[in-house]
Image: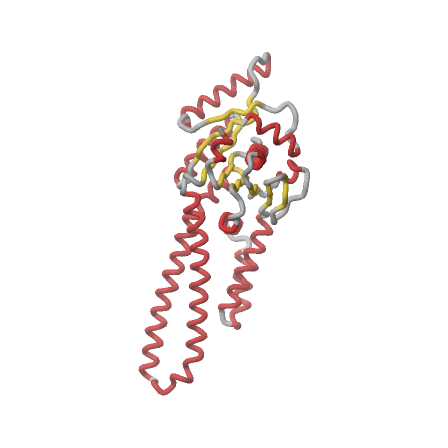
Amino acid sequence: MLLELAAQRRVLFFGGKGGVGKTTVTASTALAMADSGKRVLLVSTDPAHNLGHLFDRKIGPSPVRLAPGLDGLELDPELTVEKHLEEVTAALRRIMPIHLASEIDKHMALSRDAPGMQEAAILERIAEVVEQSSAYDLIIFDTAPSGHTARLMALPEMMSVWTDGLIKRREKADRFTAVLKSLASDKDMGNKTFGGAPHEIEEDRESRIRRMLNRRKQRFAGLRDVIADHQKTAFVIVLAAERLPVLETIELSEQLARAGVNVAALIVNKRLPDGLQGFLAERKTQEEIHLATLTRHLGKLPRHDLILAAHDVLGVEGLRQFAKDF
């Protein structure tokens, strides 16, 4: 089921509660799709990166080859925020008057720890990855635990609307400025040449501000459209057959639905096998109780159960073997 779903999509997001084996399922899916002949990019947005541990190699913010047809990268939130702030600061310094440089630096320093800054920076990086990864047939994202991911998935619409609001306010301010310039010109027609240069500088600055805002708007709108396209993009929730992961999955599914995100499947990982006795048989019974709750709330979603592996899943061959149950 999982591989059929991946074969039909351009972008696939995996999410769920921490500790349920989400990264293992995600990486195994990516490797299996690469083995099938697709060019795959595997991207981790989880601050607690585990891709490097799974593949037993260092993975950073630039794509590295993990297996034939499979590249991977890890988006470091701190590094992403730092780069994001550097780019915004440089852009503001180019378009704002020189005497405001210290104010720009002060504002950006305060923004570093502002609520939502990490999510906004990661979101813009995700948008860049989707926008600039035409060399890949499939992009698979291993996202952070549920709460962070739910906020992230809701951000494209919010950021697009917010940026659009900034552009409209900018255009309104431009019209007001144009009226003032016209009034000043009517009062002193003789100073056209003298006043032309500052006006031209200001107009160029306003034009660059609009271009910067429009670029961000287009980037967020593009990501929003990709996420909203259920033919191209899907979200898979990975969980364990336990009370808290089940309840968190139900809540995450509702949050994603409100954000217009298509939850295409549920993967229940680490299921106990049949034929157990004693303590493990009791645990198996508990699993069935929790999964009955899942079915009551999300019974319409396709679901696939994965049996708990006897050994740790590590390395390319371990991931490849694990994917045989998909």
Q: Is residue 92 left or right of residue 179?
A: right
x, y percentage for residue 98? 53, 72
Q: Nearer the viewer, residue 151 or 40?
A: 40
The structure's colour scheme is secondary structure
Residue 303 visible in this rendered orientation of the protein: yes
Who's the residue at 48% across and 23% down the image? 290
Q: Residue furthest bottom?
A: 190
Instruction: State the image quarter where residue 164 is shown.
Output: bottom left
Who's the residue at 43% across and 68% down the image? 206
> How many marks on residues?
0
Instruction: State the image quarter where residue 31 is shown.
Output: top right
Q: Is residue 195 above or below residue 285?
A: below
Residue 19 visible in this rendered orientation of the protein: no
Q: Is residue 242 above or below residue 195?
A: above
x, y percentage for residue 249? 47, 32
Q: Nearer the viewer, residue 121 or 14?
A: 14
Who's the residue at 41% across and 39% down the image? 230
Who's the residue at 43% across and 50% down the image? 222
x, y percentage for residue 78? 59, 50
x, y percentage for residue 254? 41, 35
